[in-house]
Amino acid sequence: MNILQVSHSFIPCYDSGGVVRSVYTLSKELASRGHNVTVYTTDGCTKRLDVEKNKRVDLDGVNVYYFSNISNTLRMRFKIATPVHLLRVTGKTIKNYDVIHIHEPRTTIAWIVSYYARKHKIPYVVHARGSLTLTTGRTNFKKVFDLLFGKKTITEASKLVALTRDESKQYIEMGADPEKIEVIPNAIDLSLYESIPSQGELREKYGISSQDKIILFLGRLNKIKGIDLLLEAFAEITEELDNVRLVIVGPDDGYQQKTNQLIDELGIKDKTTCTGPLYEDDKLAAYVDADVYVLPSRYEIFGNTVLEACACGTPVIVTDRCGVSDFVSEFGYVSSFDKKELKETIIKVLTDPSLPKTINEQQELLKERFSQKVIVSEIENIYKEVARQR
């Protein structure tokens, strides 16, 4: 099949979050199965990507087009892509594809492609990937965008992919036909974790004692991620446990200054390490050295980092506001969004003698439910179904 993937961001723009890795993983696996896969994206990132613009780039067997934005500021601050060349290309090329897969529909690039898809009667699939909520971010902007473009992009789609049951409800609230919705979680490429860094690399790099228990947060520094709750809980943990250290890994997404302020106010600077963003083996080294990974989000439709931590053999704690909490609750630790409960849950994990058994269980569940081969096969079946309807 000729498949077009449409993504606001793409590798190497890892600062945009887990969507980038998910779309890359999906595209690469589809290409390995013999499909002709093309990605339409832009050159926008925290800084413009240093890539070849407006022409085909072969990336691991995937055809990638990085369309140049007129303004990178608009692209990053408001998610308004301005890829003029995309407008010229899409109308001519859209008929070449059997199916189109749009990721994050509340973007300019998604609207442009969905418009041409409807015009030329090409079936398309929408994958919201946590972008539908109106309770976070620029609520008024989202409402206006939905009124003008976003709602039509969703209601006219051939199929809708939800990461969780909660996201299914969000589609329906926007007027989507429930019969079009398929719940499919994110996948993880377990082959990337067959050879992970040895223990001790992160500790050595940042001067962390081998006696310290490491509590790891890894993600964008944004208020939605609940970093403030984790910091407050950690401050109380230091009063009950010796030799604990909080390691915060991730790029600034508007909350770095507040994070630093809270660390100072809570008096935990000498027990906290902020590394900035880490990628590839450096990121894996953080998971490997952590005694527990915590995702304390206020809102999280899924949580790819939880799967990554599990794949590295690290116990995880999430709040019940994370979509992946249903999975975690089967073998591990889920806390309400409450400082006292989160503190007690972290202490329990750090002192739990049954952890090896728990870790074995979480890795078996990864293979059964979240492996790349399992999830991509489900997506592939959706493509075949909508292509037959053309």
Image (cartoon, helix red, strand yellow):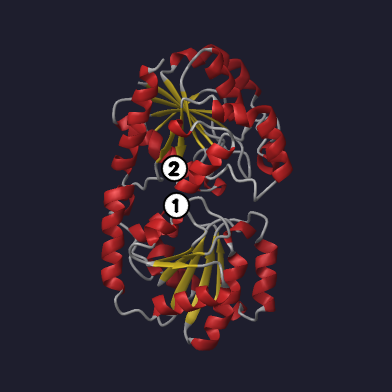
Three-letter amino acid code at the position of disc 2: Ser
Vertical relation: 188 (above or below) 240 = above
In the rendered image, residue 211, in percent from the top left (x then y), is placed at 41, 83
- 268 horizontally vs 304: left or right: right
Residue 67 visible somewhere in the drawing: no
Front in this rendered view, residue 70 or 351: 351
- 129 horizontally vs 284: left or right: right
Front in this rendered view, residue 196 or 298: 298
* Disc number for residue 237: none
For label 2, the crowd category at 10 Å Cα-Cα, with few meaning under 14, some 14 to 19 and many 20 or more, is: many
At 35% across and 79% down in the image, what residue appears?
Answer: 352
Vertical relation: 363 (above or below) 241 = above
Front in this rendered view, residue 34 or 126: 126
In the rendered image, residue 97, in percent from the top left (x then y), is placed at 43, 18
The part of the image, by quadrant, that contains residue 43 is: top right
Q: Which residue is mark 1?
A: 304
Vertical relation: 232 (above or below) 123 = below
- Quarter of the picture containing the N terminus is top left
At 28% across and 54% down in the image, what residue appears?
Answer: 194
Three-letter amino acid code at the position of disc 1: Asn
- Spatial CA distance of label 2 from label 1 is 9 Å
Evaluate if marks 2 and 1 touch, with contact meaning CB atoms under 8 Å apart.
Answer: yes
In the rendered image, residue 181, in percent from the top left (x then y), is placed at 44, 35
Label 1 sits on a secondary structure element that is helix
Label 2 sits on a secondary structure element that is helix
Residue 238 visible somewhere in the drawing: yes
Q: Earlier in the sequence, mark 2 or mark 1?
A: 2
Front in this rendered view, residue 29 or 125: 125
Q: Which residue is mark 2?
A: 22
